[in-house]
């Protein structure tokens, strides 16, 4: 039987590539805010497996669980695997950080992941079918950067959630996170078109700037039985950026 993957943030740069690759091997539920983008992405996915669309605003806590439960019941679906690619990021210096910014960031990046994992691990709502979770974090999770305190702390919290649940839900469910470095996507293309920025970034990355496909390959590995003995791990995929201390 072909398993089904639930993917949040499916229409983002990295999320789109992850979706296309996952659809080659699994049934997939594409989730995002924009239904038009979800429908366009569905057309890009493999027709060999089932592709479902579930529009969701992950910051809408009042309706999040109910919408997912209704969707699963309506489609008579069980979800075996979950990939949390949704992310909200704004570069804001501390003096301008607001409660609204903190709440939206943590709701989207962390709290929604916890709610969805709880739901998919439920016997009542998903027949306790969940067996693997991959959370898309960031290489800033273990580091720091100016104007990134809210986003960076949310990714650190996401990895903390991953580690604790990896212990709590073992051996049935494996949880891991992927920490991408700078990746060339439609969203970041304009940044890399700046020659000064591009040269500086290239100097920091021993293997050069990554692509969305590099992250998608890591996701597929962590979802598969090839990683059956891997849980609770931060898998850094950043072309060597995090180990380069060259002055």
Image (tube, rainbow, N blue to C red):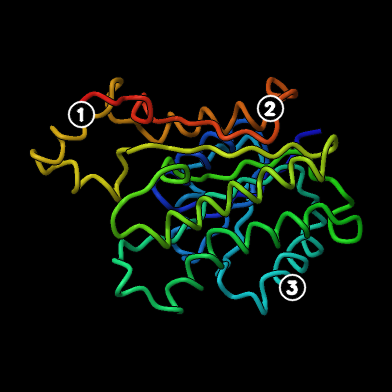
**Residue 191 tag number:** none
Q: Identify the residue at horizontal 32%, vertical 43% (top origin).
A: 185
Which of the 4 image quarters holds residue 26? top right
Task: Tell me the distance, in whole angstroms, between the alpha carbons under discs 2 and 1.
Answer: 32 Å
Which of the 4 image quarters holds residue 89? bottom left
Task: Tell me the distance, in whole angstroms, between the alpha carbons under discs 1 and 3.
Answer: 45 Å
Task: Tell me the distance, in whole angstroms, between the alpha carbons under discs 2 and 3.
Answer: 29 Å
* 223 relative to 39, above or below: above
The earlier-in-sequence mark between 2 and 3 is: 3
Q: Do the residues labelled 2 and 1 touch (CB within 8 Å)?
A: no
Report which residue position mark 2 lands on: 224
Would residue 17 be found to the left or right of residue 6 on screen? left
In terms of secondary structure, where does tag 1 sit?
Answer: helix
Q: In which quarter of the image is the C terminus?
A: top left
Q: Which of 46 and 247 lies nearest the eye of the viewer? A: 247
Q: Identify the residue at horizontal 78%, vertical 54% (top origin).
A: 120
Q: Which of 44 and 163 lies nearest the eye of the viewer? A: 163
* Residue 23 percent coordinates (x, y): 59, 38
In terms of secondary structure, where does tag 2 sit?
Answer: loop
In terms of secondary structure, where does tag 3 sit?
Answer: helix
The earlier-in-sequence mark between 2 and 1 is: 1
Q: Residues within 10 Å of mark 1 (few under 14, many from 20)?
A: some
Report which residue position mark 3 lands on: 66
Report which residue position mark 1 lands on: 202
- Number of the front mark, 2 or 1: 1
Q: Which of 10 and 149 lies nearest the eye of the viewer? A: 149
* 145 relative to 75, above or below: above
* 150 relative to 12, above or below: below
Q: Identify the residue at horizontal 42%, vertical 62% (top origin).
A: 150
* Residue 136 percent coordinates (x, y): 53, 44
């Amino acid at each position: 039987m072909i398993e089904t993957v639930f993917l949040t943030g499916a229409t983002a740069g990295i999320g789109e590539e992850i979706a296309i690759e996952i659809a080659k091997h699994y049934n997939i539920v594409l989730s995002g805010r924009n239904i038009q983008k979800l429908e366009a992405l569905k057309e890009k996915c493999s027709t060999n497996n089932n592709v479902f669309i579930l529009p969701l605003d992950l910051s809408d806590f009042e309706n999040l669980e109910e919408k997912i439960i209704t969707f699963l019941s309506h489609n008579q679906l069980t979800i075996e695997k979950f990939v949390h690619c949704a992310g909200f990021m704004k570069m804001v210096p501390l003096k301008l950080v607001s409660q609204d910014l903190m709440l939206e960031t943590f709701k989207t990046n962390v709290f929604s992941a916890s709610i969805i994992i709880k739901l998919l691990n439920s016997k009542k709502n998903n027949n306790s079918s969940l067996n693997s979770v991959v959370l898309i974090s960031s290489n800033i999770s273990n580091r720091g950067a100016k104007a990134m305190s809210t986003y960076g702390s949310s990714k650190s919290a996401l990895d903390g959630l991953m580690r604790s649940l990896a212990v709590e839900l073992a051996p049935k469910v494996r949880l891991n996170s992927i920490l991408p470095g700078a990746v060339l996507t439609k969203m970041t293309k304009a940044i890399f078109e700046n020659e000064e920025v591009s040269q500086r970034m290239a100097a920091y990355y021993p293997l050069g700037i990554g692509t969305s496909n590099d992250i998608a390959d890591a996701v597929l590995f962590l979802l598969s039985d090839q990683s059956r003995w891997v849980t609770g791990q931060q898998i850094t995929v950043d072309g060597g950026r995090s180990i380069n201390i060259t002055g």
